Image (cartoon, rainbow, N blue to C red):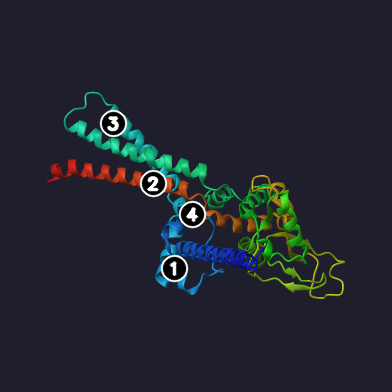
Amino acid sequence: MSEPESGNIEDRERSKELFQTAEQYFAMVRAHRRRKRAASFRERNPLAWYLDEFPAQDMYKNLLANQRSTQQEVRYHWLRQRTGWIFWSQLKTTTAVRFAAFGGLVSAFYQAVPGLHGEASDAATTFGWLLLAGLTYLVAVFWYEIWCPLLLKQTLSSKPGLLENQPSAWLRTLVEDELRRWWSKREWWPHPDLLNEQTSEDRTAKAIMSGYGVPAFAGFDSYACAHIERALFEYCTLRKVTIWRKGDHPSDLREFTPTYGYEGNRPLMHRLTIHLLNEYDIQGNPQLKVGDLVLNWHRCPLGISSHLPNRRSVNIRNETEGLDHLFSDHTGALTFAQTIAFWQNTMHPIRRLILMGLYFMSGAFFITFVVLQLQILLPKMF
């Protein structure tokens, strides 16, 4: 091969490498811009505020340019509170249910009277709107009873002792089901050039990508860990229980306060363990006492996605070892269950939208009934 031909081949190879590098760079830029647009949408758009099923958080702030203004923050919390299960549960009262049922019976009997004609027929038609208002309200109450998250519904129930009379095992099951919603599996397919052969995790990722499957992590991400820690901190404050956080060394225990972790270029997933201190554990440390709790997060290892459980098949008891210490007595079970229950306020946005629509329809039918009745009665009075 002549020298000019060899030089042309090298130039073409170099141009190809530069083109691939530039293409990768522009792909990264486009992906970064998409993430910025998505973050801006989640931060500023009321539709995103409503569709977000998880509680409001203030530990992970977006860039200053994407943060909500004070007025937008007020609108955000107003919308979240006015469209949650807690707000609409206040319309479901025993008195209102009885009134709706009684009004429906009155209108039904009134329309069933034979020989209605003229003005009486008009009056019967107006009572038909009262019947529709009562029926729609009862459907809304029935919809709430079916689809409102069970733990939150029992916490909000006006019946005295409904939640208190539930066994601790049932409360723990409901809490575990809510924690299951925060557990997730995240696949991770890194670029081979970004892997470090010196670390076992990166060697495992490269081996899995060579033909075994898709690398993935499964556990609680940083967002879930932060909220769980806040719930535990509220529990220990209400119950006057001391919780310690385990450090790098087994004997290194620090007083527990909520912290917020951040992810790097790979998913950061954890599982939780809670340990109850006994007499052997407190030897040599006068600050500790029997009955204190020790919290520790364990980073989840990398695995093959197809071999890891999904959200339907995961056993949360394996992911939250020692959670039963919070349910050892009924008072503690009630405290932690009530704390977790309020996380469910913004669940199921479509079901909440239907509930609001039913209540609005019931109100519109009742207003129509009142207006028609006034149109009949006012000419007779004046």
Q: Quarter-wise, where is residue 328 in the image? A: bottom right
Q: In the displayed structure, does residue 333 sit left or right of residue 346?
A: right
Q: Quarter-wise, where is residue 77 in the image? A: bottom left
In this view, the residue in front, 253 or 325, is 253
The first of marks 3 and 1 along the sequence is 1
Q: Nearer the viewer, mark 1 or mark 2?
A: 1
Q: Nearer the viewer, mark 3 or mark 4?
A: 4
Give the distance between the C-alpha atoms of the residues marked 3 and 1, in whole angstroms. Answer: 50 Å
Q: Residue tagged by mark 4?
A: 86
Q: Residue tagged by mark 1?
A: 73
Residue at position x 64%, y 58% in the image? 336
Residue at position x 46%, y 58% in the image? 48
Residue 9 % position (x, y): 62, 64
Question: Which of the labelled discs sits on residue 176, or is there none?
Answer: none
At numbered mark 4, what does the secondary structure look like: helix, strand or loop? helix
The crowding category of the residue bearing disc 2, from other C-alpha atoms within 10 Å (few below 14, some 14 to 19, many at least 20), is some
Q: Nearer the viewer, mark 3 or mark 2?
A: 2
Q: Residue tagged by mark 2?
A: 357
Give the distance between the C-alpha atoms of the residues marked 3 and 2, in whole angstroms. Answer: 28 Å
Asked whether residue 316 appears in the rendered view, the answer is yes
Residue 359 vs 275, above or below: the answer is above
Q: Residue tagged by mark 3?
A: 110
Q: Quarter-wise, where is residue 203 in the image? A: bottom right
